[in-house]
Image (spheres, grey):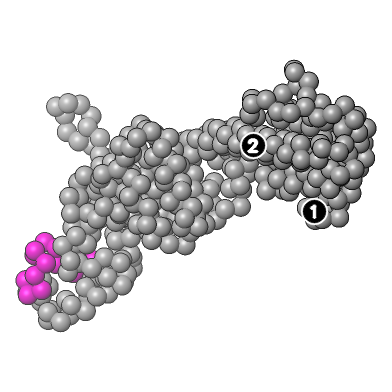
Amino acid sequence: MSTRERRRPSSETSRAVDRSAGELVTLAARRMEEHLGWYRDLPAEERSQVGLVAHAGIAQFIEWFRGDEDSSPSAISIFANAPQELTRTVSLRQTLDLVRTVVDVVESHVETLASPGDEQLLRESVLRFSREIAFAAAEVYAGAAEARGAWDARLEALVVDAVLRGEADESMQSRASALGWGDVAHVTFVVGTTPLVNGGAAAAVDTLRRAVRHERVEALAIVQRSRLIAILGGTEDPLAVVSAVAHCFGDGPIVIGPTVPHLFAAGRSARAALSGLSAAAAWPAAPRIVESQALLPERALAGDVPAQRRLIDQVHRPLTRSGQLALLTTAETYLEAGRSLEATARALFIHPNTVRYRLGRIDDLTGFDLTTPRDAWAARIALVLGRLAAAPRMTRLSTTGPLEETSKPAPTTS
């Protein structure tokens, strides 16, 4: 509020304004009932809270208008009765509607309240005080938003940490529901490096959140050491979304985990994405935005057991099923022959066209095209892993002694 001196109202005007307090509050409530649909729709208790705010505003205006030396308008105290309830129930725009309604009521009674010569003073006083209320409302809502944002950020960090640790328990469910993630479907874990920006980690997270929101996708985001992590929700095409917000990440690969049905299954997506980020350096030609599925060979070589199992399930197991021996033999021979159709055909005593046909069958069965270098390399790793998994487990009895099978063959009966 400005501290410049203002002309004092006459004692008659001050007394008239003071006596009108009850009437002004009643008229303001009636006008809110008539013109503000959101006010009519509020429950009785919340309407009472809004009424208290309107009453406090008029009461403080009257006290200030009297011109007492110690009564500079502390407009924030107008909202002191129920600030949290007000900011949760009524939006800032609706609060400004409330201020406007109260101001209109007082302005409409200027002629009857002001003594001759005080009309302009009363009008100016109403406008100046209403400005203070508007600024106070913005300050109250900004404070509430800041506190709510800090609390939400804390909840967000706890939820993401629970996903990383695979702890989809009741506490995580409660926190996710508080963040509005209780029913979010199609959840994808994304991880990359944290960019070097002014403001540090908080600025990087805020930038990512805004960019993801622009794509109309839900997101939880945190910085963990040098990694910028995002959990996307409600997207059917995470690759397109991540491509649109890739500028929010630092240099290096951005790995997208598999999409899972809901947040409580996101641990699987997180493990795959983090494993992919660790193994991405082994594929120099990888695209910057890469799905964890495309990094299965590197992840398997780095010791990721789920990736090893996935490769075995995709390649080795289908080719070792009953009736697929010809395909398995063709795949192994083709890879050993340096992906040469003619050499494979000679080794198997079949026509090259038969080799082509079988390679097509292998592609249909496994999803790996052995005629391309990367798929052939991945398939070769998968076959090796499959053979290792199927071989009898051996253990060394001593540092110098022979190896012995851990499971002995059953004795034969005569």
Answer with the quarter of the image where residue 155 lies: top right
Identify the residue at image location x=54%, y=46%.
264
- The amino acid on which the numbered mark 1 sits, given as a three-letter code, is Leu
Is 331 situated left or right of 248 in this image? left
Residue placed most toward the observer, 390 or 194: 194
Residue at x 61% of width, y 52% of height: 183
The amino acid on which the numbered mark 2 sits, given as a three-letter code, is Phe
Residue under the image location 34 percent in, 51 percent down: 246
The residue range painted magenta reads 328-343
Percent x, y of residue 404: 23, 37
Which residue position is annotated with label 1?
A: 36
Camera sees residue 49: no
| Disc 2: CA contacts within 10 A as few (<14), some (14-19) or many (>=20) | some
Question: Label 2 to label 1, Cα distance in Å?
Answer: 21 Å
Prevailing SS of the magenta stretch: helix
- Mark 2 or mark 1, which is nearer to you? 2
Instruction: Report the side of 366 relative to 136 (left or right).
Output: left
Q: Foreground residue, 397 or 101?
A: 101
Dot 1 surroundings within 10 Å: few (below 14), some, or many (20 or more)? Answer: some
Residue 51 is covered by the magenta coloring: no
Percent x, y of residue 39: 81, 50
Q: Is residue 400 or residue 211 the one in the foreground? A: 211
Tag 2 residue: 135
> For residue 54, which quarter of the picture?
top right
